[in-house]
Amino acid sequence: MADEVVLLNTWASPFGIRVRIALDEKSVEYQYREENLQDKSPLLLQMNPIHKKIPVLIHKGKPICESLAIVQYIDETWKDDKAPPLLPSDPYQRAQARFWADYIDNKVFSSVGGILRSPKGEEQEKAKKEFIEGLKVLEEELGDKAYFGGDNFGFLDLSFVALYSWFYALETLVNFSLEAECPKLIEWAKRCIEKKETVAKSLPDSLKMYDYALQIRKRLGVD
Ligand code: GS8
């Protein structure tokens, strides 16, 4: 059955981590294929000819691309009494969840790229400021709730907690403390890791991620 579902991914991608958490939440068996983004496989190019990016989920031979679309597909395909839905059932709440997931991608993840890829100095400081501002907005949206959707872990939680392993690298690269800036968000992230084995097992080691971030910067020639 496992070869019915194949995930093309790279270990450090927060987009791919989202998908891994979602598959584990639904107890879906799958075949994992690590891609080398410097030398993409013919399968990746065939399955995502438009963007040529990971993650790609291949289900029964058909590709699904873009992590948020993949997570929603997983939620709709593997409905199970044991695994509660990841997205809320109420249409308004669903629209809200999608709105915030889009915010995470376009305001938060985008500034991570800025921190990672820009040389030390003004440009990187701007990305750092945008990143922290973006997180503060998310922290306000979380408020005093246990999870973004309320009492249960779901779509938005997995969409954002997938970035957790990058936090140490980002803090070290541009010298700030996320715990000091966004204490509730850090509490929430730790709650996700502590309560959800699917999260704990999908998040790569933070030091390994830092090393990887340094390698990227070296490759780009910004350090
Ligand atoms: C982003 C995927 C992405 O950026 C999603 O799936 O949500 N919006 C998409 N994938 C990167 C690796 S993670 O940074 C990727 O595959 N890059 C290869 C390339 O750009 O050539």
Image: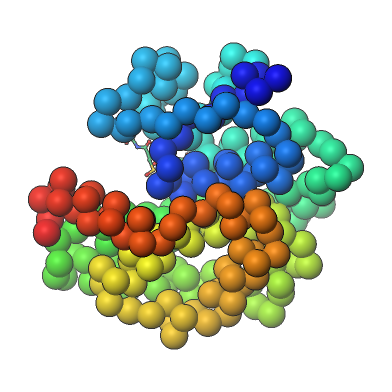
Residue at image x 74%, y 56%?
93
Query: 63 above or below 108?
Result: above
In the displayed structure image, the side of residue 176 where residue 138 appears, left or right: right
**Residue 169: image x %, image y %?**
33, 64
Query: 28 above or below 3?
Result: below
Quarter of image, res 186: bottom right
Quarter of image, res 122: bottom left
Quadrant of the frame with the C terminus: bottom left
Quadrant of the frame with the N terminus: top right
**Residue 34: image x %, image y %?**
42, 32
Residue at image x 36%, y 56%?
209
Residue that protrudes farthest toward the right in the picture? 81
In the displayed structure image, the side of residue 18 where residue 179 appears, left or right: left
Does any portion of residue 131 appear in the rendered image?
no
If the picture is divided into quarters, which one holds ligand 1? top left
In terms of depth relative to the viewer, which is nearer, 95 or 199? 199
**Residue 79: image x %, image y %?**
81, 36
**Residue 61: image x %, image y %?**
59, 14
Query: 149 above or below 95?
Result: below
Indicate how the structure is coloured in the image.
Answer: rainbow
Query: 113 above or below 45?
Result: below
